[in-house]
Image: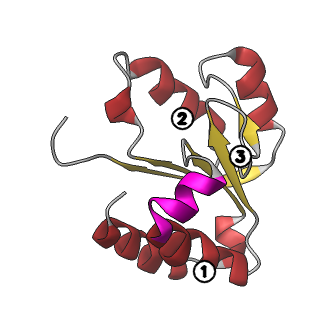
Amino acid sequence: MMRREAEWLGRYLSSIDVEDLGSVLSIGSGSGDFRRRFQPWIDAKVFDPLLVRGVRVLHHELHAAPGVDVHGDLTDPDVRSQLAGLGVRTVLCLNVFEHLPDRAPLARAKLESVPAGGMLVVTLPMRL
């Protein structure tokens, strides 16, 4: 995620009440090391402000790593069941779809993972 995108998203999320955000799940957010070393503006502009406000933030990635709370293929029913049990209200899917050859299964899985009244935020680069 580029800096300006992280700044925009941070401002947007800061305008939403904590109760409306609920717990937040970030899909494909990378390991903790990746976030700190290569794109530290994401934590600084998006995740850290949420944590300061008392929002629980969970990170998903395909593979287990430090700083990853839940891992696995999102089209796997067992992984989707695990995510459903986390009780998240907001799902962030930031710059993930462009890495997939078949986007439809992930799109369906994401729509199913957002509870009624919840929020799904999806971002993509300008060009795929």
Please state the horizontal and vertical placement of residue 29, each as a whole percent of the image: 55, 49
Q: Main secondary structure of the magenta part?
A: helix
Q: Residue at x 71, y 16 (%)?
A: 77
Q: Secondary structure at mark 1?
A: helix
Q: Amino acid at mark 2?
A: Leu
Quadrant (top left, top right, bottom left, bottom right) of the N terminus: bottom left
At which x and y percent is residue 47? 59, 69
Q: Nearer the viewer, residue 33 or 103?
A: 33
User: Mark 2, mark 1: which one is toward the viewer?
Assistant: 1
Q: Earlier in the sequence, mark 2 or mark 1?
A: 1
Can residue 51 be seen at all in this image of the molecule?
yes
Q: Find residue 36 and report its horizontal and vertical position in percent.
A: 56, 64
The residue under label 1 is: 49
Residue extending furthest left?
Answer: 127
Per the model, the C-alpha gap separating discs 2 and 3 is 21 Å
**At label 3, which amino acid type do we have?**
Val
Residue range of the region highlighted in magenta in the rendering:
32-40
Magenta-span inclusion, residue 34: yes
Q: CA distance from mark 2 to mark 1?
A: 25 Å
According to the image, label 3 marks what residue?
Answer: 68
Where disc 3 sits, the SS reads: loop
Relative to 76, is 40 on the left or the right? Answer: left
